Image: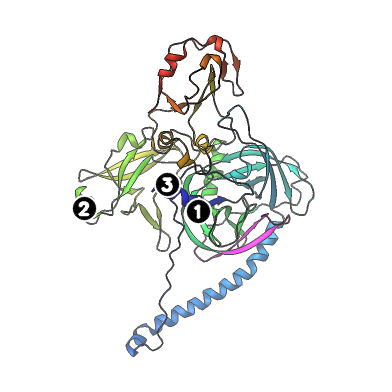
Amino acid sequence: MLSSSIRTLRRLKCCCNKSSSLLLSLTKDCCVNNPKAPPCNTESSSFSKFCFGERRQSSLQRWHVVNSRRSLHTETDAYLATELALDSVVKIFTVSSSPNYFLPWQNKSQRETMGSGFVIPGKKILTNAHVVADHTFVLVRKHGSPTKYRAEVQAVGHECDLAILVVESQEFWEGMNFLEFGDIPFLQEAVSVVGYPQGGDNISVTKGVVSRVEPTQYVHGATQLMAIQIDAAINPGNSGGPAIMGNKVAGVAFQNLSGAENIGYIIPVPVIKHFIAGIEERGKYMGFCSMGLSCQPTENVQLRNYLKMQHQMTGVLVSKINPLSDAHRVLKKDDILLEFDGVPIANDGTIPFRNRERITFDHLVSMKKPNEVARVKVLRNGEEHAFTITVQPLQPLVPVHQFDKLPSYYIFAGLVFVPLTQPYLHEHGEDWYNTSPRRLCERALRELPKKAGEQLVILSQVLMDDVNAGYERLAELQLASVCACDFLGGGGVGMDGTRWLTKHYWRAIQPVATLISCS
């Protein structure tokens, strides 16, 4: 199931004019199931006309009113969006350089990319994180100006694919206006996406309607957060541009679905406000909270009977708990999670949302502030229990991304030791899930940490020398423990401060090699 999901997720791409590697592979449903309603039968019986005539007439009247309003709304949307965007939306020019995880002391060639952004209150510019990821230099240009201004990245949230830029030049802010945030749009409401997509240098406005609102896989951050699907054209360069509904921002464009027609995604306002509020309250990006649970649906009748669930009960089965989460203190494997903050959870893990829409209950968890308390109701051995759990951002055992930082490494007598990360596995190519070492890949995707700060250290390669002759085939093995040799003194120092020990301080290669586990 996971490998097929990876093939599907490759079609999701960040809308910046550069290639983006996948950071995590989870299931993404790309199909739209929209059956047409049956046609109205004009030859219906008098009974049906008598029973449903008034209802049908009132429905048609409401449809005409809504449709006329929508037509008027869509006609003015593009004009309003253009007028707002002229003094708000900027073009972003980024020079970036990513690390080479096979040779962690080197960086790859620098590249130039472009994206979009817009002004928010406080003289700040909001854009996507992947627009400025691994940046070394950032410039911004406002509409109608030939001048590019230097910008600094104030805060980045790679999980939610958002970033905040600041510009020190007062000349840049002359005539600039900020945009206000609105609400989550309803289905079929019109939005206008403004930005600087490929194909030209001037500002561009595309129109569309909201097709779907649900938690979606964020390609850049490899997280599951709420997103809005629209049918407006979103192309490379649109990343970070606002999606405007009326005179307010409904979201930020960030990715599309390649191979499909007119399927783009925008980050909704609740996720944006959660990102900004965390920075304003704590001074830095704190991340999105998680309960640290892996849950299984309980749609099978035999499973519900085995778990002693009554007919009216609904919930999900707790199958795995992160040892670093607060849930590990109160919950147990095979508990049934019935409610979260008083909201009942269905057997498929969804909760009610707006007008007959449903979303996964993870959305409620992710919108919690760090260290905030949540109330849960649990069924355990046929008895109901109420607990309180403190939710907080949790880090996986193997980091999913390592943007804006140099990789850590340690070289001893030509043996290169590095922490296992998913970016390291991505160096095996686009099809990294199938081409990277199977044991390392399985641990990266499924294994949980047992204590804070735990890392999986691997021997990535051997730099040939007389001292390590005969060990050149040792590679991609996990380091189980370190021998009692004296590792201090001598040698050089790497780019990130790690010590490079020469062969003169190598005591015995054999004991160390036997402590490298192949499991």
Location of mark 2 (residue): 302
Mark closer to the chain start, 2 or 3: 3
What amino acid type should be assigned to the residue bearing mark 2?
Answer: Gln
From mark 2 to mark 3, how far is it between C-alphas? Answer: 29 Å
In the drawing, does residue 112 fall left or right of residue 243?
right
Residue 480 in view (yes/no): no
Observer-nearest of 16 and 471: 471
Residue 282 picture quarter: top right
What amino acid type should be assigned to the residue bearing mark 3?
Answer: Ser
Query: Where residue 433 sits: x, y (%)?
Result: 46, 41
Q: How is the image coloured?
A: rainbow
Task: Give the structural element (helix, strand or loop) at label 1.
Answer: strand
From mark 1 to mark 2, how far is it between C-alphas? Answer: 34 Å
Q: Which residues are magenta?
A: 185-208
Mark closer to the chain start, 1 or 3: 3
Location of mark 3 (residue): 3
In the rendered image, the residue lying farthest to the front is: 470
Between tags 1 and 2, which lies in front? Answer: 2
| Discs 2, 3 touching: Cβ within 8 Å | no
* Residue 227: assigned label: 1
Residue positioned 58% across, 53% down in the render: 252
What amino acid type should be assigned to the residue bearing mark 1?
Answer: Ala
